[in-house]
């Protein structure tokens, strides 16, 4: 057989003996690999591929198009740009979750600017940006608008630092924008009519426009014209400055909507949009997801009856309605999979949900009055009813004043598919309402019986026994939230030694100290972050960790921004995370990095 | 409310406003704020950020009504302080409520739990 049967001009390093000779075997292999890798989408698969060998690492880096960075300080923008050259979509997360509860000072960090500048030069073909808990300025938004001509999607969740001025630049310059979603952001009112800044000529490609969190009035006529010329618009979430009459007009313009955020769902004074008593959402045959109801006038609820039968998701969590007002609606929602509401619906409302929504996967009940002295509107009765009626439940967030172990145990047995279990007994240190026992057995049953559990938030009176259960059975738990629980360091030890999959640990106001923290030395490099606030860790204890684990960034600070980070003998807040690029350069004065 | 205001002039804390400068006379009209709502909240030591309802939601859902009276105004008004993000928003809303033009004529003050009249603005907004 001819040795040169596949030869090409020029010679390369012949790497193999054998019958078939190709001059650049490595390159061929890489080409093949790249063509195969294009099909790999998940981060886990791609990370696995990149570890095989250098050649695979390069091929993977060349073909990755979706970038996900769970902690913006884990890696520098430059390092990312050096490794991945062809990114089309970026997801970045910044501040720790406890920032949502005012536990992180405003100037702590998570600035988007360095990322914006780096990507502006390196990823000019970027199409999608997703940011969560980042500080984004109007200048950042301007940079995005000017740098990424192909930008199709911008999604900002729990971000702050920008205003309607920045939005106006985005919507006027990003000609390929299809998705603009603002979710629970803090948006300043710069008194700019940003809705009018969308290009006014021709058909728009807009598919999704969500601005329910923008707390300022908008130009309704401009919005109506925009909606009228957006035939592809599927998701529209209005803010509370849109009245129900205006909403109705919009639904007539956009019958193709699948996701609708209703805005205020109420009348405004002097509103000359008289609503026909027969008016309803009958035009919206495709709506499957309904939210909004920011200032609900409950007498208008019958308007949504025509869409109830098709709904898979209903968010009434800003609507103060009672069981009697809920029942006629929920009774028609047979296909509902996601339901968010206020506890104003009471146990009776939950029973109605349990009766009808047999397909329910996700339930969130928020407190109307988030105070420890409030009257409990929902209790173990509602939880039990849900567990009996909604066997397919996967995710639950439940705020209540009191709870019993029996109800929690029942849920663990009736709903074995639970992946996320977050129970918040608002009264701190409250035991089982009926037996007076700690809530250990309830949470123990959850970790034991719900074999797919990956996220857990605990509350109520808990001893180290609860932590023992979590460590013993919570082998898949990746996120754990602890607040005002536990007896001693042993509790923390159980967690850190037992929960082998733990990625995110957030603890506040619990008696855990240096000894407990030490038990996690073997695991901290595998985690995204650890947060301990108002616990019993000392500065020396944190310093020990920092010394033993040099790649860990150990931040210590006080909420009131006093320097040093300590309150009395203990560190007020410890926030630590691994980083490939050392401590961040943008830490403010009050953050001490050990 | 009006007579109370005059009677307390002596014990009232007066600080010059940055814009108004010092040496303002008694002609400055005062606004009185009296927190109405669940009185028991003020006695308990409320933990920051508890319960874990995110601040966006807390602002939107919780209504904390404050009674506001103004020297010379015949009626008292109520305003939900939870719907504001900071002092400047709040003060602007007060101006709108009472139809005021120029801020520097008015000093917002409030009575704290010890019964002292305090100038609005010293304590961090949260």
Image: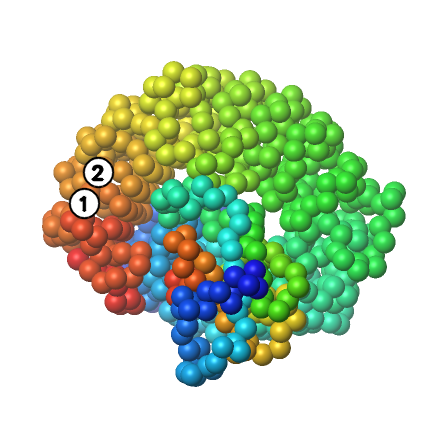
**In the image, what residue occupies the spot 20% across and 43% down?**
A536
Cβ–Cβ under 8 Å for marks 2 and 1? yes
Q: Chain of mark 2?
A: A
What secondary structure is found at the residue carrying circle 2?
loop
Query: Label for residue A463?
Result: none
What secondary structure is found at the residue carrying circle 1?
loop
Query: Label for residue A537?
Result: 1
Residue B15: percent from the left, percent from the top?
40, 74
Q: CA distance from mark 2 to mark 1?
A: 7 Å
**Picture quadrant of residue A246:** bottom right
| Horizontal side of residue B109 vs A466, given as left or right | right
- State the colouring used for the structure image: rainbow
> Quarter holding the C terminus of chain B?
bottom left
Sequence order check: which comes first, mark 2 or mark 1?
Answer: 2
Counting other residues with Cα less than 10 Å from the Cα at mark 2, is it few (<14), some (14-19), or many (20 or more)?
A: many
**In the image, what residue occupies the spot 37% across and 28% down?**
A430
Q: Which residue is mark 2?
A: A512
| Horizontal side of residue B24 vs A515, given as left or right | right
Q: Is residue A506 above or below residue A447?
A: below
| Horizontal side of residue A34 vs A394, given as left or right | left
Of residues A374 and A393, the one drawn nearer to the viewer in this rendering: A374
**In the image, what residue occupies the spot 65% across and 33% down?**
A322
> Quarter holding the N terminus of chain B?
bottom right
Of residues A506 and A177, the one drawn nearer to the viewer in this rendering: A506
Residue A3: percent from the left, percent from the top?
32, 53
Residue A214: percent from the left, percent from the top?
59, 60
Q: Chain of mark 1?
A: A
Q: Could you tell me if residue B16 is visible in this image? A: yes
**Picture quadrant of residue A250:** bottom right
* Residues behind callouts 2 and 1 on a single chain: yes
**In the image, what residue occupies the spot 28% across and 47% down?**
A533
Q: Is residue A206 above or below residue B47?
A: below
């Amino acid at each position: 057989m001819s040795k040169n049967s596949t030869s090409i001009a020029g010679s390369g390093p012949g790497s193999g003996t054998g019958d078939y000779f190709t001059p650049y075997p490595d390159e061929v292999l890489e080409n093949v690999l790249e063509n195969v890798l294009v099909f790999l989408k998940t981060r886990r698969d791609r990370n696995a591929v990149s570890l095989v060998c250098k050649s695979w690492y390069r091929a993977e880096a060349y073909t990755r198009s979706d970038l996900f960075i769970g902690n913006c300080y884990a890696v520098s923008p430059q390092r990312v740009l050096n490794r991945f050259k062809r990114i089309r979509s970026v997801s970045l997360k910044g501040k720790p979750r406890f920032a949502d509860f005012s536990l992180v000072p405003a100037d702590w960090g998570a600035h988007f600017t360095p990322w914006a500048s780096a990507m502006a030069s390196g990823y000019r073909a970027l199409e999608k940006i997703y940011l969560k808990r980042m500080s984004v300025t109007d200048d950042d938004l301007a940079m995005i608008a000017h740098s990424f001509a192909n930008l199709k999607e911008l999604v900002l969740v729990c971000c702050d630092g920008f205003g309607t001025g920045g939005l106006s630049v985005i919507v006027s310059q990003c000609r390929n924008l299809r998705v603009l979603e603002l979710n629970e952001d803090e948006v300043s009112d710069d008194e700019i009519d940003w809705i009018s800044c969308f290009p006014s000529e021709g058909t728009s490609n807009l598919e999704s426009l969500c601005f329910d969190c923008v707390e300022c009035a908008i130009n309704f006529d401009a919005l109506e014209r925009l909606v009228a010329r957006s035939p592809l618009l599927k998701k529209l979430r209005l803010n509370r400055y849109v009245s129900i009459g205006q909403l109705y007009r919009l639904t007539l313009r956009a019958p193709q909507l699948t996701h609708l955020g209703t805005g205020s769902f109420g009348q405004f004074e002097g509103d000359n949009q008289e609503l026909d008593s027969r008016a309803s959402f009958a035009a919206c045959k495709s709506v499957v997801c309904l939210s909004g109801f920011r200032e609900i006038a409950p007498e208008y609820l019958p308007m949504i009856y025509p869409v109830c039968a098709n709904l898979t998701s209903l968010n009434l969590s800003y609507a103060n309605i009672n069981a009697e007002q809920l029942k006629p609606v929920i009774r028609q929602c047979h296909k509902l999979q996601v339901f968010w509401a206020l506890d104003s619906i009471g146990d009776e409302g939950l029973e109605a949900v349990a009766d009808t929504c047999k397909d329910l996967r996700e339930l969130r009940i928020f407190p109307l009055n988030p105070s420890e002295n409030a009257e409990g509107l929902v209790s173990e009765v509602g939880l039990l009813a849900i567990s009996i009626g909604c066997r397919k439940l996967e995710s639950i967030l439940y705020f209540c004043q009191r709870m019993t172990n029996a109800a929690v145990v029942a849920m663990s047995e009736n709903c074995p598919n639970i992946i996320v279990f977050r129970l918040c007994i608002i009264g701190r240190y409250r035991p089982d309402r009926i037996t007076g026992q700690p809530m250990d057995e309830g949470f123990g049953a959850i970790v034991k019986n719900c074999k797919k559990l990956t996220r857990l938030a605990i509350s109520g009176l808990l001893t180290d026994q609860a932590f023992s259960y979590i460590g013993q059975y919570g082998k898949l738990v990746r996120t754990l939230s602890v607040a005002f629980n536990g007896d001693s360091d042993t509790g923390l030890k159980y967690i850190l030694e037992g929960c082998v999959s733990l990625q995110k640990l957030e603890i506040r106001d619990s008696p855990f100290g240096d000894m407990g923290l030490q038990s996690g030395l073997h695991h901290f490099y595998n985690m995204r972050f650890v947060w301990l606030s108002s616990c019993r860790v000392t500065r020396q204890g944190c310093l020990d960790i920092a010394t033993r684990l040099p790649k860990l960034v150990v931040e210590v600070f006080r909420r009131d921004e006093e320097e040093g980070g300590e309150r009395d003998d203990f560190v007020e807040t410890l926030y630590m995370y691994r980083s490939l690029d050392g401590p961040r350069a943008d830490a403010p004065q009050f953050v001490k990095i050990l | 409310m009006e007579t109370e205001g005059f009677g307390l002039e002596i014990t009232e804390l007066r600080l010059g406003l940055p814009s108004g400068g010092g040496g303002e006379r008694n002609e400055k009209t005062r606004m009185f704020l009296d927190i109405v709502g669940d009185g028991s909240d003020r006695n308990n030591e409320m933990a920051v950020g508890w319960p874990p309802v995110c601040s966006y939601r807390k602002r939107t859902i919780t209504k904390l009504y404050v009674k506001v009276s103004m020297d010379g105004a015949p009626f008292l008004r109520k305003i939900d302080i939870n719907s504001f993000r900071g002092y400047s928003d709040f003060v602007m809303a007060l101006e709108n409520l009472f139809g005021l033009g120029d801020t520097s004529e008015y000093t917002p003050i409030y009575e704290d739990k010890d019964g002292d009249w305090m100038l609005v603005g010293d304590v961090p907004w949260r």
